Amino acid sequence: MRINVRVIPGSSRSDVETGDPWRVHVHARPAEGKANEELLQILSRHFGVARSAVRILSGYASRSKTVEVDTEGTAMAKGTR
């Protein structure tokens, strides 16, 4: 699944707001890839997949990103979530 994400770095909270684009608040500042890493960790928890199943396809250096989540073999893909 591919989703468009708007990242809000340096936030006081870490959470996900669905929509188009999805808004993801992260604590980390956008330095040395820390905000991107936290984004991927937050999305992996949100979707219940391994961190390795979430990757940034475009927008690595931007607040607007396209993210791919591989849900194959997960409870979400089987419809039990």
Image: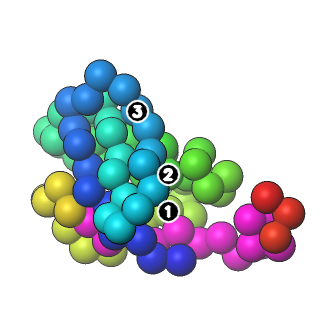
Task: Report the front residue among 7 and 36.
Answer: 7
Q: Position of residue 11 (x, y in %)?
A: 26, 29
Q: Position of residue 45 (x, y in %)?
A: 59, 45
Residue pictured at 26% horizontal, 56% vertical: 6
Q: Position of residue 43 (x, y in %)?
A: 49, 51
Circle 1: residue type: Val
Q: Which residue is mark 2?
A: 43
Circle 2: residue type: Leu
Q: CA distance from mark 1 to mark 3?
A: 17 Å
Q: Which residue is mark 3?
A: 14
Q: CA distance from mark 2 to mark 3?
A: 10 Å
Q: CA distance from mark 1 to mark 2?
A: 7 Å
Task: Report the front residue among 58 and 6.
Answer: 6
Q: Position of residue 44 (x, y in %)?
A: 55, 52
Residue 60 in view, yes or no: no
Q: Quadrant of the C terminus?
A: bottom right
Going from the N terminus, do you reach mark 2 or mark 3 first? Answer: 3
Residue 76 in view, yes or no: yes
Residue pictured at 29% horizontal, 22% vertical: 12
Q: For residue 54, which numbered disc appears in the image?
A: 1
Q: Is residue 77 above or below residue 12?
A: below
Q: Name the residue furthest front.
A: 19
73 drawn magenta = yes
For label 1, the crowd category at 10 Å Cα-Cα, with few meaning under 14, some 14 to 19 and many 20 or more, is many
Residue pictured at 14% horizontal, 39% vertical: 31
- Which residues are the magenta region? 65-78
As helix, strand or loop, the secondary structure at mark 3 comes to: loop
Task: Report the front residue among 4 and 58.
Answer: 4
Are dots 1 and 2 in contact, CB under 8 Å? yes
Circle 3: residue type: Ser
